[in-house]
């Protein structure tokens, strides 16, 4: 080091033990230059690889170059001035070194050359920042601030604090030092601002500029929120006034990120299961586990969690600096130290408080940002899962349970991720505090450790009880929500039969059980909180008493007492957090288990339907056997069906024969254990269920169903589906709201809207599950003739119609007769009648019922004619019947 600097690297006595601090020349020209310059080079390499990753990211919007502004030009000019000043200083050093009476050390050349190269890198980064469209750079801002601070200790301004004026001997170096420090401070100040004209060139509606392009201080102190808070204070706050989210904070990206990790977990579990089938040793089986939602979330969140963990780790040490500095400050007041030591202690104490606050809030910001991902991603995964649930899974999970998981369990997962770092940081800080207490109280601090160890088993027992009560409470809550969903779905029947009181008693009973469990849970959690709030007090008392009694020489002086109390306060804060973490951990464990069970529930097949039918066919099924869930007995067997394009095919059968199940098989909602279903390539399906599905929106929106408005096609659809009279009756026409906030429609009106929606979609294949059963006969005949039939608007479409209306079967191209889940017969209407099979018998039964119904109508008509002028006995009240009826006359004379 002497050969490099011609002086010692560090002298502690000249710096700390003197009345004024003095830094050695070697330290000033090496460390104070190397640290900021090395930071910029390291950060530039990191940013280079990050930019390459962002360019390959589809969610990252490509920015246009930012404009030339006064601020940009000023920054470039100041950096150029630093380069010129450093070059001039290097030339001056070469000149001085050439003189016989001067010798310039190597460290001076190292300092100036390293500065020149770093300033050239800085000007390159500024140009690249403008070219990439970035309005500021946190790397450059931190570099200029760090370099300004380090340069102050090697500048003439720091030398002015010293009694020795050796640094002022060379006037040229003095001028270079003043210019360099002044320009560095100016550059650091300008780097803290974003160009005020950026909003003239930037489209805020297409970018997340409010966060991404804020200057360092605004991002550091969250001052960018002031505009939003001020707007909310002065005006009624509206959601559309918020700035656009960053692409990587939107639901599509977050869900995809979490879904990818969850898929990996599922695939890993499947591989383990397959290995288990082929034969795995017992020891390997012990290590096997199912898919873990927590691991999937952690893998998806690791950048945010890592950043938060680093900040939490630093915070755990910085938060312990105030007690140590307090000890130094108390000691300084009683000793004869230089006065500047006190200023240093006070200033560092202030910086430690500010730095710990910044670390805490930014750590919380990272954790909240990370918590949004599972909350948003899991909600989206729930929505995706609900759309893919199999029939058996739908029977397992009710609507109330699913809503409960989305509202409650997902919130517990959110709070768990938010508190994830506290699970390890709180115990670590407790250990660090105890270690510091050992320095002040010695072995007496073990008394506090003993008290904590005594509390731990009690807390563990209470946590176990809390876990059991939490599971019991969630069970009662699920039962209550399930019953409430049933009540709301059948509220009309309940009101008609006056069953309010029995159902109210049932709900109240479940609620009372849930409330009773919640009271027990609150008592247990309150006991845990009380125990841990009292714990620091018990620890402090036990430590102080033990410290005084263990040795007569131990005296509680101000330094020991105040520092210990400060440490005990830190200990109390962390120990009081532990019961909350335990409660969160218990409840989150239950939430993770419930959510994981739901996400692992059985789904529909990924691709149950192929798109490789023959050229002339729209739908084909070859020897298909279908069941509702895997492993159960088939519901449809030996199904062979071929529907040519543009044909009208009818599916006929008795109630429960499997007509609706056949449509479910075509839609892919059943498992194909044998055979396959094929749909024409590119063919779009429209399904009209037997129970119409109506949204709580306007009638027009129900028909359009996100399709653009085509006035002529819309009016034609309304006319063909017999909806024009209904629109004339409704107060708002087709703009009338339907459902909870609007009018209630009859079953026939809902069915006609469902048919109109399918017609308007202009699909290729129509699956019509007995759509005419809910409408009147004359309306059904009109819809069949103008919509479904050979002359209807769908005449060129492929139509598969499930029906029991035998009057329209003569107009279809082909009939499939189902019985007990099998296709017994198929052919045209005349062919099936000629076969004299089950279909013919069903037609004959239908004709007989029709004849009987007509005969009954004729008898009623004759009876009405015979009763003209008389009232039949069965309609007469015995208290008002006439004397003719009492005398045995079968009729009663009435006056018309």
Image (cartoon, helix red, strand yellow):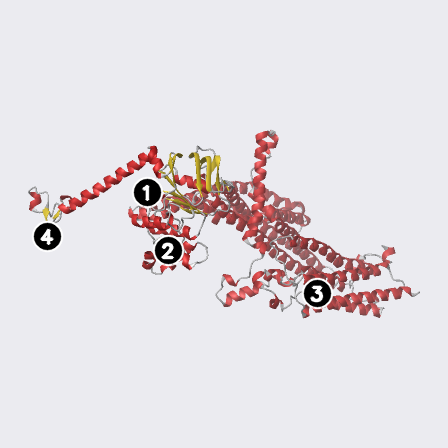
Compare residues 392 and 315 and report the one nearer the observer. 392
Q: Which mark is residue 805?
A: 1
Residue denoted by label 4: 895
Gap in angstroms between the C-alphas marked 4 and 1? 44 Å
Nearer mark to the viewer, of 1 and 3: 1
Where disc 1 sits, the SS reads: loop
Which sits earlier in the primary sequence, circle 3 or circle 4?
3
Looking at the picture, how far across and down is residue 605, in whole percent? 50, 40
Cβ atoms under marks 1 and 3 closer than 8 Å: no
Horizontal side, residue 856 vs residue 704: left or right: left
Where disc 3 sits, the SS reads: helix
Gap in angstroms between the C-alphas marked 3 and 4? 108 Å
Q: Quadrant of the N terminus?
A: bottom right
Crowd tier of the residue under label 4, counting other residues whose Cα lies within 10 Å: few below 14, some 14–19, many 20 or above = few
Residue denoted by label 3: 188
Looking at the picture, how far across and down is residue 874, in whole percent? 15, 43
Gap in angstroms between the C-alphas marked 1 and 2? 24 Å
Gap in angstroms between the C-alphas marked 1 and 3? 85 Å
Residue denoted by label 2: 718
Gap in angstroms between the C-alphas marked 4 and 2? 48 Å
């Amino acid at each position: 080091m002497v050969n490099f600097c011609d002086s010692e690297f560090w002298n502690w006595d000249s710096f700390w033990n003197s009345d004024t601090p003095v830094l050695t020349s070697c330290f000033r020209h090496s460390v104070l230059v190397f640290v900021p310059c090395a930071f910029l080079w390291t950060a530039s390499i990191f940013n280079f690889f990050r930019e390459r990753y962002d360019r390959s990211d589809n969610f990252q919007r490509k920015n246009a170059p930012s404009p030339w502004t006064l601020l940009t030009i000023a920054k470039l000019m100041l950096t150029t001035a630093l380069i010129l000043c450093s070059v001039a200083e290097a030339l001056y050093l070469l000149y001085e070194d050439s003189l016989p009476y001067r010798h310039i050390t190597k460290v001076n050349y190292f300092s100036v050359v390293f500065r020149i190269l770093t300033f050239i890198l800085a000007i390159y980064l500024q140009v690249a920042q403008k070219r990439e469209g970035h309005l500021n750079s946190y790397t450059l801002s931190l570099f200029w601030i760090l370099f300004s601070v380090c340069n102050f200790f090697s500048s003439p301004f720091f030398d002015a604090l010293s009694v020795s004026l050796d640094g002022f001997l060379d006037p040229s170096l003095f001028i270079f030092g003043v210019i360099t420090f002044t320009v560095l401070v100016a550059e650091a100040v300008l780097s803290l601002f974003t160009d005020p004209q950026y909003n003239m060139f930037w489209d805020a509606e297409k970018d997340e500029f409010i966060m991404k392009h804020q200057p360092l201080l605004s991002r550091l102190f969250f001052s960018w929120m002031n505009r939003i808070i001020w707007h909310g204070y002065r005006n009624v706050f509206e959601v559309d006034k918020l700035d656009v989210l960053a692409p990587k904070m939107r639901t599509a990206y977050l869900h995809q990120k979490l879904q990818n990790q969850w898929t990996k977990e599922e695939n890993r579990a499947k591989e383990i299961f397959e290995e288990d089938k082929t034969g795995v040793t017992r020891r390997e089986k012990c290590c096997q586990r199912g898919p873990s939602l927590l691991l999937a979330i952690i893998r998806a969140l690791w950048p945010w969690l890592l950043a938060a963990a680093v900040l939490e780790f630093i915070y755990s040490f910085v938060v312990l600096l105030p007690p140590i500095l307090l000890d130094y400050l108390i000691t300084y007041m009683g000793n004869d130290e230089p006065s500047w030591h006190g200023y240093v202690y006070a200033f560092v104490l202030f910086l430690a408080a500010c730095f710990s606050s910044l670390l805490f809030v930014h750590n919380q910001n990272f954790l909240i940002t990370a918590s949004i991902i599972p909350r948003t991603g899991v909600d989206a995964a729930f929505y995706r899962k609900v759309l893919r649930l199999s029939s058996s899974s739908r029977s397992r999970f009710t609507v109330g349970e699913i809503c409960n998981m989305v509202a409650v369990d997902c919130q517990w997962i959110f709070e768990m991720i938010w508190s994830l770092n506290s699970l390890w940081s709180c115990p670590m800080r407790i250990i660090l505090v105890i270690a510091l207490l050992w320095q002040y109280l010695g072995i007496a601090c073990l008394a506090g450790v003993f008290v904590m160890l005594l509390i731990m088993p009690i807390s563990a027992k209470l946590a176990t009880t809390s876990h059991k009560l939490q599971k019991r409470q969630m069970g009662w809550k699920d039962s209550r929500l399930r019953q409430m969903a049933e009540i709301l779905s059948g509220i009309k029947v309940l009101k008609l039969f006056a069953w309010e009181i029995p159902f109210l008693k049932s709900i109240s009973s479940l609620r009372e059980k849930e409330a009773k469990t919640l009271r027990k849970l609150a008592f247990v959690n309150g006991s845990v909180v009380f125990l841990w709030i009292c714990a620091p007090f018990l620890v402090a008392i036990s430590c102080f008493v033990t410290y005084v009694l263990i040795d007569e020489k131990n005296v509680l002086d101000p330094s020991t007492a105040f520092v210990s109390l400060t440490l005990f306060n830190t200990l109390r804060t962390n120990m009081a957090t532990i019961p909350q973490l335990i409660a969160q951990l218990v409840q989150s464990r239950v939430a993770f288990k419930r959510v994981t069970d739901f996400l692992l529930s059985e789904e529909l097949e990924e691709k149950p339907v192929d798109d490789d039918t023959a050229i002339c066919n729209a739908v084909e099924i070859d020897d298909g056997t279908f069941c509702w869930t895997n492993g159960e007995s088939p519901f449809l067997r030996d199904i062979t069906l071929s529907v040519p394009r543009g044909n009208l095919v009818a599916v006929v059968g008795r109630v429960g024969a499997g007509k609706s199940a056949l449509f479910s098989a075509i839609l892919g909602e059943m498992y194909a254990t044998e055979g396959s279903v094929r749909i024409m390539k590119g063919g779009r399906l429209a399904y009209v269920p037997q129970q119409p599905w109506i949204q709580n929106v306007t009638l027009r929106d129900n028909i359009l169903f996100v399709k653009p408005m085509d006035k002529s096609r819309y009016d034609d659809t309304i006319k063909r589906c017999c909806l024009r009279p209904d629109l004339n009756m409704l107060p708002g026409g087709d703009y009338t709201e339907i459902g909870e906030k609007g009018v209630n429609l009859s079953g026939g009106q809902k069915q006609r809207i469902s048919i109109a929606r399918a017609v308007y979609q202009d699909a290729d294949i129509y699956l019509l599950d007995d759509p005419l059963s809910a409408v009147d006969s004359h309306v059904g005949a009109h819809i069949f003739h103008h919509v479904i039939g050979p002359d209807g608007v769908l005449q060129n479409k492929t139509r598969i119609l499930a029906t029991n209306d035998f009057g329209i079967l003569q107009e279809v191209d082909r009939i499939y007769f189902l019985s007990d889940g099998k296709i017994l017969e198929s052919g045209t209407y005349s062919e099936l009648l000629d076969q004299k099979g089950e279909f013919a018998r069903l037609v004959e039964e239908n004709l007989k019922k029709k004849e009987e119904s007509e005969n009954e109508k004729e008898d009623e008509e004759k009876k009405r004619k015979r009763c003209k002028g008389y009232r039949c006995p069965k309609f007469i009240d015995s208290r008002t019947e006439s004397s003719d009826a009492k005398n045995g006359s079968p009729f009663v004379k009435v006056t018309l």
